[in-house]
Image: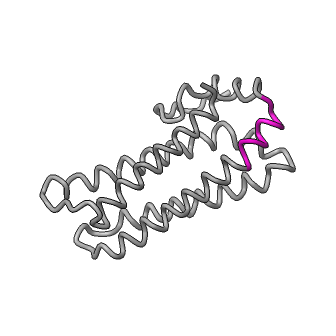
């Protein structure tokens, strides 16, 4: 499986986790027992870790290789801006006390879902096809194989040259 397919699989996993959280927090799945309340921060932590790690992998691998092309520079810049918005929403959700009204959390989760979907569509529909065109399969394979085995493997520190 190539690097971009791994990134697309991550996209699906990220959206699945967001949907689990939305169902948990909005009451679509009624969980009021103590164990379910304890699971919420873990679920959010899983989402945050998965999302941040995925974004960092893209920023280390794909984006630097596409910033130099006129065709992709604007898309990469938009991805960076959208990533900043996603980070801000994650921080706002983290700061909410558990006893905060669910409406506030619902709104933030809905906003996060929208931002993530926008980000993923921009990548899968626009950036990835242009990357394949501009860089080619061989270069993309080289980029991903020397940098990562899987987009969600632990991030390795950059080597200093």
Q: Position of residue 89 (x, y in %)?
A: 47, 65
Indicate left or right for 89 with 134 as reference: left
Asked whether 85 falls inside the magenta stretch, the response is no
* Of 28 and 66, the residue lying toward us: 28
Indicate left or right for 22 with 82 as reference: left
Number of marks = 0
Image quadrant where residue 106 sits: bottom left
Indicate left or right for 102 with 107 as reference: left
Q: Position of residue 83 (x, y in %)?
A: 58, 56
Image quadrant where residue 28 sits: bottom left
Q: Residue at x 74, y 54 (%)?
A: 75
- Screen quadrant of the N terminus: top right
Colour mode of the rendering:
one colour
Q: Position of residue 26 (x, y in %)?
A: 31, 67
Indicate left or right for 94 with 97 as reference: right
Type of secondary structure dominating the magenta stretch: helix
Asked whether 135 falls inside the magenta stretch, the response is yes
The span shown in magenta is 126-136
């Amino acid at each position: 499986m190539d690097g971009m397919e791994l990134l697309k699989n991550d996209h699906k996993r990220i959206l699945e986790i967001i949907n689990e959280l939305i169902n948990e927090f909005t009451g679509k799945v009624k969980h009021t027992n103590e164990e379910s309340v304890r699971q919420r921060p873990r679920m959010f932590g899983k989402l945050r870790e998965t999302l941040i790690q995925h974004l960092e992998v893209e920023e280390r691998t794909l984006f630097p290789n596409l910033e130099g092309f006129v065709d992709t520079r604007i898309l990469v810049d938009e991805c960076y801006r959208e990533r900043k918005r996603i980070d801000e929403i994650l921080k706002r959700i983290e700061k909410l006390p558990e006893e905060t009204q669910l409406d506030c959390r619902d709104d933030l989760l809905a906003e996060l879902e929208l931002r993530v979907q926008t980000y993923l569509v921009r990548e899968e529909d626009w950036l990835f096809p242009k990357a394949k065109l501009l860089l080619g399969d061989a270069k993309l394979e080289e980029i991903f194989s020397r940098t990562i085995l899987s987009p969600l493997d632990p991030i390795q520190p950059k080597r200093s040259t």
